[in-house]
Image: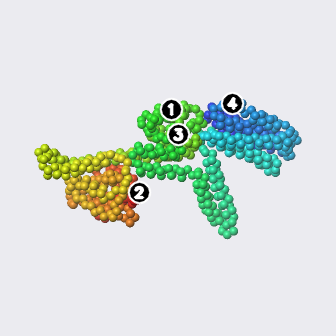
Amino acid sequence: MPELIFLSALLTLIVGATVFWVNPQRTVNQVFALLSTATTLWLFFFFLALREGARYAVDPSSDPIPWLRATSSVGATFPWILWLLIESITAHGRTLRQNIAKSFPWLIFAVLLSGLCFTNYFIPADSTPENPRRGIGYLVYSASSFILYVLLLVLAYRQLRKETGVRKIEMQFLTLNCGLTCLLVIALTAAGSYSDYRFLSRLSPLVILIFYILTAWAVSVHRIFDARQVFLSVVQRLTFVLTLCFGIFFLTRALHKFIPAPFDLLISVVVFSSIAFWLQRLSSEWFGISLAQKINITRRTIIDLARSEPSPDKLVVSFETLLREWGQTSYARLMFDSGELYVSGDLEFTKNRPGHAALCKDGWSTPESLQRQRAEPGLVDLKQFLTDASLALIVTAPRGSPSPSLLIALGTKVNHRPFTYPEVQQLQDLAEFMDNILARSRLTMQARQSEQLATIGLLGASLAHEIRNPLVSIKTFAHLLPTRFDDPEFRRRFNLLIPGEVDRIDSLTQQLLDLSNPRRHQMEHISLHSTVRETVDLMLTRATEARISISSTLTAAKDTIHADASAIRQVLINLFINAIQALEHQDTDRRIEIRSRSSPNGSVILEVSDNGPGIPPEQRAKLFHPFASTKTTGMGLGLAVCSDILHEHRATIIVPETGRPGATFRITFPAPPPQVGA
């Protein structure tokens, strides 16, 4: 036991020196260094008292009483130092000297109680280890210490209700750790002194050490934790361990009468392990400390946003709105790498400033975490940036990268509480997830644009031919107009044909614009059969030039789907082009068939088939992946674009085995939601 206390004293001194070294300019760290010194002396004097008490049995001249007086004398200063610690946390900007000047009443009590310890009223002169005695002064000392600690708890509670932000969290830790631990020390000391269980008083140093380490961790580590969550997590894990241990112990004893060993123990372990894990999962939901549940909900929301919004720019706006809700803040920005700086609107963060390297090192930063760290140039610059921009948190994605592609910056919370480290970890996960989603969205948009341009090029000749026909009619009528204007029959035919030809040209050019201009899908109830017929008419000229026949068998009883007509037309054009290219080098009969039918669950099934060479089995698994192609030309993006468009429509596309020559693409559209007012 004495050796353990001596090691505890050394550990206390080392931890205190480390806290002071982390940020010697911070008043909290200075007061904690003072507390460290007092705690080290208290443990060291307690160690000497135990050592002298152990020697007394061999050498009666050994006297532990002076060291007990010194131990109690140092202990009398703890309420004063703890008051200083509370003031240094709550009175931001005040120096240690100013706090000491304000603490004069507490200092007077500390001096009086310390002096009392060296009188015979505290420990009578005839007290020995064999016959320990306590005077009235010891009772006064214990009662006064108890009252002072109660006053500290009341003061801490009152300050706790006033404070906000990180000071509130630090006060929560201080109140829970300091007050309760000190009361426990007094109770153990009193129980050991006035009962036969003398060993209880020797547990005080261990309790003090635990309190000391927890307090050091709470007020000095740059990772901020919520006191409530930490307390509930400790209670949860303690409950888990106690349930497991006591449950296995008592159930094993109960089963031992009926079941031989070791089967009784095995059954007990299985039963109470299941119960303990069930209680842990249930308590996580009750106490609201399950972080995985919250982040999974946010991830699903991100996925839903990505499915409904193909534009990366609009997706960024949606993500920023989601982050404002998640972080309970009015400000959120996604800052992207634009070469020499990260920028989002009016917020800029250049790469050549010292704070950039400091931010990339940890991958995150908050003003509260920077306040607890030693003032280095990079950290000072980063703190200045956060202060100027009124930011409460900034993270990088990917984390740990010296040149991240994305920064996420959040403003101060509405309740002014700081972002805790578990929340930082959640935001880092979300940042990397959003970064991946946005990168995929940009690639998908580029793929669509490339595929649309390729489609326009392939359709150019056919559309030129289609447009030339009505232009010939218009040109003919224009030439005849001066000489035959007075002819009633000519004017009748002019009025009948020319508007229709102009509408046809307008329709063809509008389809080209739809193909070449990516936009957000306008979901509405449309007729699938009408869209199919329009697309077949559009592709008919090109198919005829390639000596390919197109036949339609549209038998779906209800062909209404909830979709964007232009997007579905893009899918069908891609499938038609693939079929035409597959059939162009075939000498035999060339056919494309398109069929529709209804399924029992209300969905509509559309199939596009050809009688070409088909798709090799090894290509089927990656057929809808970008840059996967069975052709020697093209980029292999068409089917990937089709898959993405249909995915956004909650539709599916597969290549089933039909047992017939060629390839068949089967699209299944879900049953549309009921129309409003229908």
Mark found first going from the N terminus, 2 or 3: 3
Q: State the CA–CA distance, disc 4 to disc 3.
A: 33 Å
Question: Mark 4 or mark 3, which is nearer to you?
Answer: 3
Q: Residues within 10 Å of mark 3 (few under 14, many from 20)?
A: many
Question: Mark 4 or mark 1, which is nearer to you?
Answer: 4
Question: Mark 2 or mark 4, which is nearer to you?
Answer: 2
> Is there CB contact under 8 Å for labels 2 and 3?
no
19 relative position to 450: left or right: right
Callout 1, which amino acid?
Pro
Q: Residues within 10 Å of mark 2 (few under 14, many from 20)?
A: few
User: In the image shown, does 199 or 177 lie closer to the viewer?
Assistant: 177
* Res. 217 visible in picture: no
* Res. 482 visible in picture: yes
Q: Residues within 10 Å of mark 4 (few under 14, many from 20)?
A: few
Q: Which residue is mark 2?
A: 676
Mark found first going from the N terminus, 1 or 2: 1
User: In the image shown, does 39 or 128 lie closer to the viewer?
Assistant: 39
Residue at 69% from the left image edge and 64% from the top image edge: 253
Callout 4, which amino acid?
Gln
Q: State the CA–CA distance, disc 1 to disc 2.
A: 57 Å
The quadrant the C terminus occupies is bottom left
Callout 3, which amino acid?
Gly
Residue 498, image x and y in percent?
Answer: 20, 49
Q: Residue 411 — which label?
A: 3
Secondary element under disc 2, as helix, strand or loop, is: loop
Query: Residue lying furthest bottom in this view?
Result: 258
Q: Residue 354 — which label?
A: 1
Q: Which residue is mark 4?
A: 98
